[in-house]
Image (cartoon, rainbow, N blue to C red):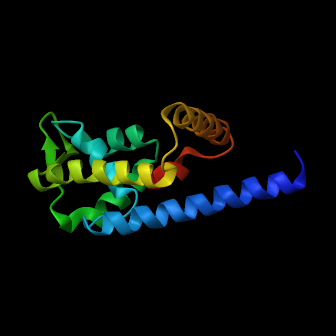
Amino acid sequence: MELSEVTRINRALNKMSKLYREAKARKLADLGLHPGQDVLLWVLASADEGMTVSELAAQLGIESPTATRSLARMENADLFRREHVPHDRRQVRIVVTDHGRELIEAIETVWAELAADALGPVPTGQRQLVLSVLEEANDRLLKLVDKSVLADG
């Protein structure tokens, strides 16, 4: 690859990452959420009976202390409650509240809007190609970094 192409790719990926995160932050702010909290709440909502912090961390591909810190930041928003696990009082399950569940559809709408805004009128076939290229790039980069980097979704 020539340096001019390398520079263009580097610039485009850095710029897209920053712009996507900022656009996501602005849209999620209307819901009272920050980037990363949307993914955490969405994953929690997929488990009707809740999850332990370690189960949540495993689902998100992050360490338990990172999940604990994220939950602490969300503590006062009435998005989840903590329930003791009956067979092990040391364990706590995180269960999404009705208020938290009400946000799931809005979160998915934000994601859909961001995807549409980012890709614009790209035809379906090309969208699939773009998605494949991005997923392959993510897979290659994941081999180079610690998975905890993914904590902010």
Please identify the quadrant where the N terminus is shown. top right
Where's residue 37, x and y in %? 34, 57
Where's residue 67, x and y in %? 37, 52
Give me the residue at 52% from left, 37% from top: 127
- With 126 as the anchor, is 124 left or right in this view? left
| Residue 143 position by quadrant | top right
Number of numbered discs: 0
Where's residue 150, x and y in %? 51, 49
Give me the residue at 48% from left, 47% from top: 121
Viewer-proximal residue among 78 and 21:
21
- With 7 as the anchor, is 71 left or right in this view? left
Give me the residue at 57% from left, 36% from top: 135
Give me the residue at 82% from left, 52% from top: 5
- With 16 as the anchor, is 46 left or right in this view? left
**As drawn, which residue projects farthest toward the right?**
2
Viewer-proximal residue among 66 and 103:
103
| Residue 31 position by quadrant | bottom left
| Above or below 150: residue 123 | above
Viewer-proximal residue among 72 and 150:
150
Where's residue 13, x and y in %? 65, 55
